[in-house]
Image: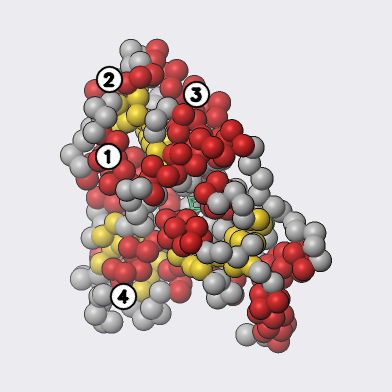
Amino acid sequence: MNGTTQELKEKITALKERLDVTVVAHFYQRDEVFEMGDITGDSLELARKTMEDDSKYVLFCGVGFMGQSVKIMSPHKRVVMPRIACCSMAKMIGGEQYENSVQFLEANGITRENIMPVTYINSDADVKAAVGKMGGMVCTSSNAKTIIEKALEAGKKILFVPDRCLGQNIAKGMGLKSCVIGDGSDVNEADIICYDGFCSVHQLFTLGDIAFYRKKFKDIKIVTHPECDPAVCDASDFVGSTSQIIRYIKELPPEQKVAVGTEFNLVNRLRKENTYVLSSTKPECPTMNETTLEHLYETLVAIEQGEPINEIRIDPDTQKWAKIALERMLAL
Ligand code: 13P
Ligand code: SF4
């Protein structure tokens, strides 16, 4: 580590001690930023643990929807982000596209009353609020199956937004029928109707990558995130959220080779021996990587100077309904 990085880390640590602030970091953050986190984890863990924290300021190192979720759940907290980087999947749907999807189902004979919407947490507050208003809820990659099981109890069609891959993977795992809006199939025949969104990073992992590693190492384990294409998940030995992947790999014997299909920073931080990135490219999340140690430092300085930057603000109506959708998830 060069002197500048070490100096910056020391300055950040000193600022954290002086200020009433908690630094929160997602697993996909750069290593040096991740190391500064007081609370670290996957999106569900961050949502839960941050709610229990009592600092005045939450400094969230992650992507926009994650900081928004903290603000929605704890409106009294001041939530600031070194970079309000927007997850590309979350950007694929807003309130208008959500409403268009509902209208598409209506035009195909499914009434609004017969739709139970579920939104992946990787979505804007507007979408969460629209889902909350229709009686629906939020899910993350680690609890999606539980949430869908609960949603099905209403006996309605599930509208799942925005990740078609997560929706299809969950449906497959539960023996349910799914379709993607616009794929030409009859929405009436599906239990789970998915919006056509996806993660640009997890689309990088292919069946060709799996074939390459299986040929190279006979007994290798293939591990992927449920945002990967359903065909890729089907060909994997284990599919799980970021925390579930970490736990799975920790339990493997050290000599077991494993190729992992999720974001590069996380894979690179796992045990160094016998772990491979399941891609011929470097699958970095550009928006997660926007946050640097310098940004973190500047954000703390701004708090100390009494002029916080990049503060998350949500209008009261959106906040109210998005909170209802998130609370329905957390209650499970
Ligand atoms: P997790 O819910 O596993 O933290 O995933 C969040 C995410 O953005 C994955 O791309
Ligand atoms: Fe969004 Fe994909 Fe990045 Fe996760 S990895 S934050 S889903 S763009």
Counting residues from the N terminus, which is met first, the one under dot 2 or under dot 3?
3
Q: Is residue 16 above or below residue 28?
A: below
Q: Callout 3, which amino acid? A: Glu
Q: For the residues labelled 2 and 3, say whether their Cβ atoms are less than 8 Å apart.
A: no
Q: Callout 1, which amino acid? A: Lys
Q: Is residue 97 something one can see in this rendering?
A: yes
Residue indicated by mark 1 = 150
* Outermost residue, left side: 175
Mark 3 secondary-structure assignment: helix
How far apart in space, not on screen, are marks 4 and 2 (Cα)? 43 Å
Q: Position of residue 24 (x, y in %)?
A: 55, 65
Other-residue count near label 4 (Cα within 10 Å), few / some / many at <14 / 14–19 / ≥20: few
Residue indicated by mark 3 = 99
How far apart in space, not on screen, are marks 4 and 1 (Cα)? 30 Å
Residue indicated by mark 2 = 188
Counting residues from the N terminus, which is met first, the one under dot 1 or under dot 3?
3
Q: Position of residue 31 (x, y in %)?
A: 55, 73
Q: Is residue 153 left or right of residue 279?
A: left
Mark 2 secondary-structure assignment: helix
How far apart in space, not on screen, are marks 2 and 3 (Cα)? 18 Å
Q: Callout 4, which amino acid? A: Lys
Q: Is residue 115 above or below residue 198?
A: above
Residue indicated by mark 4 = 250
Quarter of the image for residue 55 reads bottom right
Other-residue count near label 1 (Cα within 10 Å), few / some / many at <14 / 14–19 / ≥20: some
Q: Callout 2, which amino acid? A: Asn
Q: Position of residue 191 (x, y in %)?
A: 26, 29
Q: Nearer the viewer, mark 4 or mark 3?
A: 3
